[in-house]
Amino acid sequence: MTTFDGSVPIHRHGYVKLLDIMGSDQDIVDAARISYDRQGDSKDRALIRYLLRHKHTSPFEMAEMKFELRMPIFVARQWVRHRTASMNEVSARYTELPDDMFVPEKVWLQSTDNKQGRAESIDDENIIGSIEMANTKAYEWYGHLLSEGVSRELARGVLPLNIYTKFVWKMDLHNLMHFLNLRLDPHAQEEIRDYATVIEKMVEEHFPLAHEAFVDYVRDAYTLSTMEVEFVRHVIKEYRKLFVPPIDDKLTELLEGLEMGSREIAAFKEKFYG
């Protein structure tokens, strides 16, 4: 077991703490080869990229990361929609929750064309004050109910969704990359993106080859429709007509300039040369 000290603070009361890691880039390629034949970094990199490019994802499930996370309940409720993790959360039935609640640094207005999104921000100290006042009042009632002997499992019902919870969360690398792809998206809520950004940096640190492939083939990649593929094929076909041979050498040179390997270039030509 690998242990790690310290945590990365998120907002005022939250944090991400890496508790444990199982596996490495090497374990991913070993699982894919079903052997322990070390063949060097360059071949390992090519294999990892091949696996992710062709969606052979089970070798990535051989690696896992475990975190301790502290976040507002409204963020945690989005978090637990990713059901492929193992998780255990602090229980307000067994313990009294501390008076830590999320207060935004600035106020965002509701978007008029996106039901789940926000529009521009405004500076309004009165709204921030109203949120803080509601937090204080809710926690006062929580304390009052507990002092009256009301059970913790019932008293917690008056607490707002912006109070902080804490949980341990473990996920394999394949599903973690899927989580990151969704929660790093600009359309995801900003507060959960802040946590996902920290976790991605930890993935990059401990699984650099897998993370590089994730960026190239998942996070920053696009899926093309049939119509879009036909359009790209048409553009390439017309581009090739403009040159006398060896135009393929020129295209290969351009693709190599994008740091594409020979297999990636061959796959590109198979897709789009038509």
Image: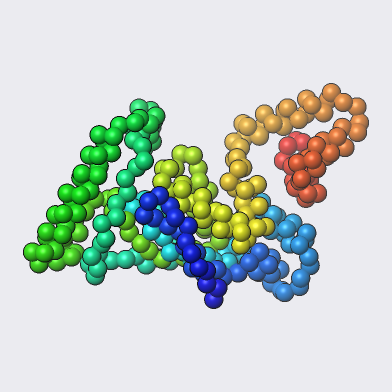
Seen as rendered, the residue at the extreme bottom is: 1
Q: Is residue 81 in view?
A: no
Residue 190 in the image: state x and y as whole percent: 43, 43
Residue extending farthest to the top is 242
Hey, which residue is sitting farthest right in the picture?
245
Residue 138: tell me if it is visible.
Answer: yes
* Vertical placement of residue 155 versus 161, above or below: below
Q: Residue at x 62, y 51 (%)?
A: 214
Is 142 drawn above or below residue 237 in the view shown? below
- How many labels sit on residues? 0
Q: Is residue 265 left or right of residue 171?
A: right
| Image quarter of the C terminus | top right
Q: Position of residue 169 (x, y in %)?
A: 43, 64
Residue for point 55% across, 53% down? 200
- Residue at position x 65%, y 58% in the image: 208
Which of the two residues, 47 or 94, is positioned nearer the viewer here? 94
**Rendering quarter of residue 252:** top right
Q: Report x, y in % for residue 82.
A: 43, 56
Quarter of the image that includes the N terminus: bottom right
Which of the 4 quarters of the picture holds residue 203? bottom right
Seen from the viewer's position, the closer of residues 127 and 32 is 127
Colour scheme? rainbow
Horizontal side of residue 62 vs 82, given as left or right: right
Q: Residue 59: x, y in percent?
A: 62, 64
Image-based side of 232 in relation to 146, left or right: right
Q: Residue at x 67, y 57 (%)?
A: 209
